[in-house]
Image (cartoon, rainbow, N blue to C red):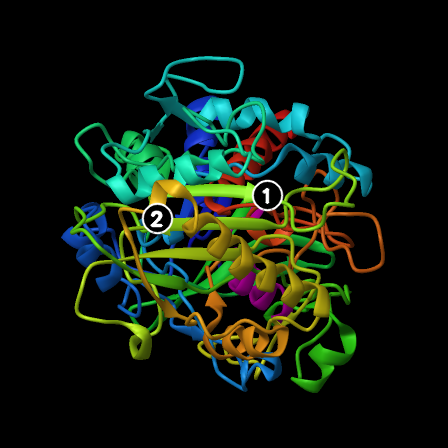
């Protein structure tokens, strides 16, 4: 192999995880780091603005990989678009900026599954390490970190009614912090990753800008890695395509994949790490037979329960203003299970176009946050330019559908409380006549879509389908780690941006310790 350059570490993917790892390695080791990003620099002004129009303009743009699923049998054979960032900052440059860490039981479950070092108490410090929380330092929040986290400001009156309604039904409220001691059973206003002057605080802004110009740091954009390079069973570098030319670069210490739940397994498979049978079918020489690569895909699903609003409401500057995490099964063991239902709520008509009206509205959006269904990511060919094949198998489990049906019922219980009296108009979607389980099932299957939180396809663990160990090292090879949302054995309850950043912080510590 003719390597053009040599670096201590090569990081593939400048998203929620890759930017964090690059920052920590440069700050702590002063070693040479190459960060490769398939997308553009983050110089589109819409990335940094926080108004809804700017944010939604990024979805389906050149800052998005443009992924869609195969036809989903349980969703009427619809193809579901799943936005994934293809730009410096990755998903943190195009997402809705909501900051949700997940539930403490999510991480305790990871440890229970055999992943030592990943319990809630062991990962809490990594959330705090990143954070510069405007509410100040506490047992659950950090200050002085690169990532600005702010509380929601000036929620609409109808969003305040949501919190009051939840309290009327017996939930907690009044300053509830879902990133604090307890996530579930309290209504709250969402925190977000924004600067004090209301600009997006992506990981590119928070973690890359401070190290731009560092003499040992190199970042290359529009540089799509096409394969990992191995010497026997050790990763020694990568090949990437930039401006029509292929380049090969060497990693003296490690290669770190941080490409996300679709691109990380795809790149492993293209490089000979995956199911031997699948790779053989595409003519890819085998490095190591790891059948779990691309399996265990999990994602969050949501839909809208929408209403007319009797009063005009201010335009929100976050996709959802208020929220709630709760359980749909009263018999569940609360000591070991995470909440399975999340709500987005805001003064918008977040429903399909056929249900919208030309008047003010508000929407409850129930979200399935602990899906039982599992899907796959696979190759369509051995051409790196082809997107991976996505089969999430949404609502394959009847239990998942039951959670979302309960989400409609709870939305109606909330809207019929006294705090909504001055706001509550006609139910637009699914409509007050839609009440039976069969009718609700049909509605959900017709309109449900993803929250764009795919995880789990290079899962951490010790079973036959595990891809990485608790140190995030890929089984069967040396010099290669995966550090992004794909390593989650089970999905977290809530938006996956904050957990991915914490994974990266812990990964960086482990990489530094191995140095």
- Which residue occupies the foreground of this view, 398 or 438? 438
Give me the residue at 57% from left, 23% from top: 181
Q: In the visual, does 65 lie left or right of 106?
A: left
Q: Quadrant of the C terminus?
A: top right
Disc 1: which residue:
326
| Start-end of magenta stretch | 253-269
> What is the number of the mark on residue 320?
2
Give me the residue at 37% from left, 58% from top: 85
256 falls in the magenta region: yes
Q: Is residue 123 above or below residue 485?
A: above
Q: Secondary structure at mark 2?
A: loop
Residue 202 visible in the snapshot: no
Pointer 2 or 1: first along the chain: 2
Give me the residue at 57% from left, 48% from top: 255
- Counting from the top left corner in percent of width and height, residue 3 is at 48, 56
Q: Quadrant of residue 291?
A: bottom right
């Amino acid at each position: 192999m003719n390597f053009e350059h040599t670096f201590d570490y090569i990081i593939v993917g400048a998203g929620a995880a890759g930017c964090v790892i690059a920052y920590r390695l440069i700050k702590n080791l002063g070693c040479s780091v190459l960060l490769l990003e398939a997308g553009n620099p983050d110089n589109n002004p819409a990335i940094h603005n926080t108004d809804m129009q700017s944010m939604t303009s990024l979805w389906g743009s050149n800052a998005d990989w443009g992924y869609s699923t195969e036809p989903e049998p349980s969703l009427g054979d619809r193809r579901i678009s799943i936005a994934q960032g293809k730009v410096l900052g990755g998903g943190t440059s195009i997402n809705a900026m909501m900051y949700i860490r997940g539930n403490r039981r999510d991480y305790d479950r990871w440890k229970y599954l055999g992943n030592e070092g990943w319990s809630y108490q062991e990962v809490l410090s990594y959330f705090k390490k990143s954070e510069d929380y405007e509410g100040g330092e506490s047992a659950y929040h950090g200050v002085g970190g690169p990532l600005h986290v702010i509380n929601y400001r000036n929620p609409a009156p109808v969003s305040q009614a949501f919190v009051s309604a939840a309290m009327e039904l017996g939930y907690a409220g009044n300053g509830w912090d879902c990133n604090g001691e307890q996530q579930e059973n309290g209504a709250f206003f969402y925190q977000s990753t924004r600067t004090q002057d209301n600009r997006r605080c992506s990981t590119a802004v928070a973690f890359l800008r401070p190290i731009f110009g560092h003499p040992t740091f190199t970042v290359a954009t529009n540089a799509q890695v096409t394969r990992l390079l191995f010497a026997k069973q050790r990763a020694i570098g990568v090949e990437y395509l930039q401006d029509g030319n292929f380049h090969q670069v060497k990693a003296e210490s490690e290669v770190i994949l941080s490409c996300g739940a679709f691109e990380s397994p795809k790149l492993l498979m293209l490089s000979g790490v995956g199911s031997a049978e699948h790779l053989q079918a595409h003519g890819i020489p085998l490095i190591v037979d790891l059948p779990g690569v691309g399996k265990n895909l999990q994602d969050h699903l949501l839909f809208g329960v929408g209403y007319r609003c009797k009063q005009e409401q201010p335009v929100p500057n976050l996709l959802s203003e208020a929220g709630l995490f709760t359980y749909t099964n009263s018999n569940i063991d609360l000591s070991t299970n995470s909440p399975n239902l999340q709500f987005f709520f805001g003064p918008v008509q977040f429903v399909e176009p056929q249900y919208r009206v030309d008047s003010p509205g508000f929407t409850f959006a129930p979200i399935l946050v602990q899906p039982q269904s599992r899907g796959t990511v696979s190759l369509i060919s051995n051409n790196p330019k082809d997107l991976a094949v996505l089969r999430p198998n949404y609502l394959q489990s009847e239990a998942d559908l039951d959670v979302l049906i309960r989400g409609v019922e709870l939305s109606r219980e909330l809207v019929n409380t006294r705090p909504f009296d001055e706001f509550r108009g006609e139910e637009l979607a699914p409509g007050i006549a839609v009440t039976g389980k069969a009718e609700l099932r049909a509605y959900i299957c017709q309109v449900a879509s993803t929250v764009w939180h795919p995880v789990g396809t290079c899962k951490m663990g010790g079973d036959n389908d595990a891809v990485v160990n608790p140190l995030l090292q890929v089984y069967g090879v040396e010099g290669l780690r995966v550090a992004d949302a794909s390593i989650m054995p089970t999905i977290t309850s809530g938006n996956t941006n904050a957990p991915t950043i914490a994974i990266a912080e812990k990964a960086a510590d482990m990489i530094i310790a191995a140095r």
